[in-house]
Image (tube, helix red, strand yellow):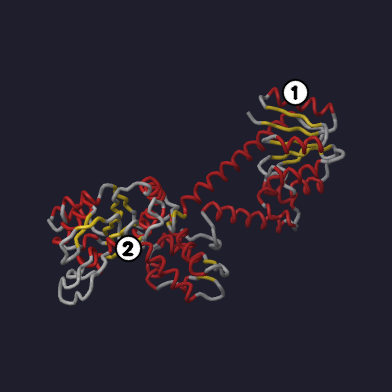
Amino acid sequence: MAKILIADDDPTILSLLNKILIAKGYDVKLAEHGGVAEKMLQSEQFDLLISDIKMEPVDGMQLLKKTRKMRPQVGVIMLTAYATVSTAVEAMKEGAFDYIPKPFKIDELLATVKRALDYQRSLAEQIGDQAHLETKKYFGNIVAESEGMVNVCEMIKRVAPTKTTVMVTGESGTGKELVAEALHSYSARAEGPFIPVNCGALPETLIESELFGHVKGAFTGANANKVGLFEAAKGGTLFLDEINSIPHQVQSKLLRAIQNKKIRKVGGTEEFEVDVRIVAASNQNLEALVKEGSFREDLFYRLSVISIEIPPLSQRPDDVLALAQHFIAQEMEGGEFPVMDNAVLAILQNYIWPGNVRELQNVIQHSLTFMKDNKITKETLPSKLIVSYEENPSAQNAALTGEFERGKSLKAFLRAKEKEYLKNVINTMGGDKVKAAQELDISLATLYRKLPEEKKD
């Protein structure tokens, strides 16, 4: 049940509004002037304020301004018997939802109350949704606008606090190490070391020594004891990327280390315990490697207690522009944020990204290097993206209008284009907002809500 506060120094109006709104099921409180209403707003929560303008000692405009500061979530409808355009404009600029002249029609009043409550409810939901989306958008350094990446982030939240071994899969360049870092950062081991190792980059002859260490004299060139990565990651997380590259003869020792939490250095005779969580990753299908005999089945199942699969960027186009913003922000380091023209937007959104997120990051770095006048244009992009775009007429037809600015989600972009259109109509009407509202077939109140920056005029 919506809770409404009515402020008016006319007892007849107070009584009438009270009866009308209570009959419609609203919870109504009455204030005989603005000062009383101000005190009630300080101590109670309301969904809507209906206020007369001409009151003493605190008039309706003063009450409106104070309400916007104290309770910005409360919708406000202004009433007055002295209706003028200038008064209406001032009320809208100060944040009133709508303006109703006296005498009013009951049906129109009730319709306005309903619209105001619906609007405030929708606004509250959008704010809540946006907070939820922002939490998902940057989970660690992970940008997650798409459903696929949101699901990945949800998995991280569930799995990170556990001690379970995790297998992260996905194509090269999708961000498997970022997922591993997030698993570490949101775990009880966050204060411990996070050590990533690219198993594919280690020579086969040295990989066992790198993982488990060796003792002096274990082999030619072993002139001193060496601490292995398992030992170095004590109390933290060891991320084994491209684990499919580990030679078969080392896989058995890795399995034993994971099962028993003990290792033996190369050339050593003693086993000692290691406290480390394993997160592994592969850009190949390990199940297929198991079937062909190049990867141990028991190790595969030990590593894959929990699996997190990162979809390729081609399957999550919603992430492309958000990632582009993210990489631009990283490169600019707080400097003036550049804009992207229409063609660049269309090219980025319609490219297939075979190199995934890593390729997009490289494209952004390339564009920032060659941009002029702080603007990213088609000419600043690598030639292969332009060729791909020009060979795709449907992508060219889908080009967006406008510019790409910092922090713009799709909703923000659409809001910006709406404002641009509204301003064009106002300019066409010689700056007359009343005529512009009539031309747009919206109320003056709606026009001011859609152009909140006009409050600064």
Q: Position of residue 342 (x, y in %)?
A: 51, 64
The answer to whether 391 appears left or right of 37 in the picture is left
Q: Amino acid at mark 1?
A: Lys
**What residue is shown at x 56% (from left), y 70% (from top)?**
335
Quick one: SS at disc 1? helix
Q: Amino acid at mark 2?
A: Pro
> Neighbour class for label 2 at 10 Å: few (<14), some, many (≥20)?
some
Answer with the quarter of the image where residue 201 lies.
Answer: bottom left
Q: Quick one: 151 or 78, which is closer to the camera? A: 151
Q: Position of residue 257 (x, y in %)?
A: 21, 55
Instruction: Residue 206: tell me if it is visible.
Output: yes
Q: Quick one: 302 or 38, which is closer to the camera? A: 302
> Neighbour class for label 1 at 10 Å: few (<14), some, many (≥20)?
few
Quick one: SS at disc 2? strand
Q: Position of residue 42 (x, y in %)?
A: 73, 38
Mark 1 / mark 2, whichever is N-terminal = 1
For residue 3, which numbered disc appears in the image?
Answer: none
Q: Please tell me how many numbered marks the rendered image carries.
A: 2
The answer to whether 85 appears left or right of 118 in the picture is right
The answer to whether 405 appears left or right of 152 in the picture is right
Please give the residue where the numbered disc 1 appears in the rendered image.
19
Q: Quick one: 393 or 35, which is closer to the camera? A: 35
Please give the residue where the numbered disc 2 appears in the rendered image.
196
Rounded to the nearest angstrom, the CA distance separating label 1 from label 2 is 70 Å
Query: Compared to 271, does 163 lie above or below?
Result: above
Quadrant location of the N terminus in the rendered image: top right
Query: Compared to 202, does 444 lie above or below?
Result: above
Q: Position of residue 61 (x, y in %)?
A: 80, 44
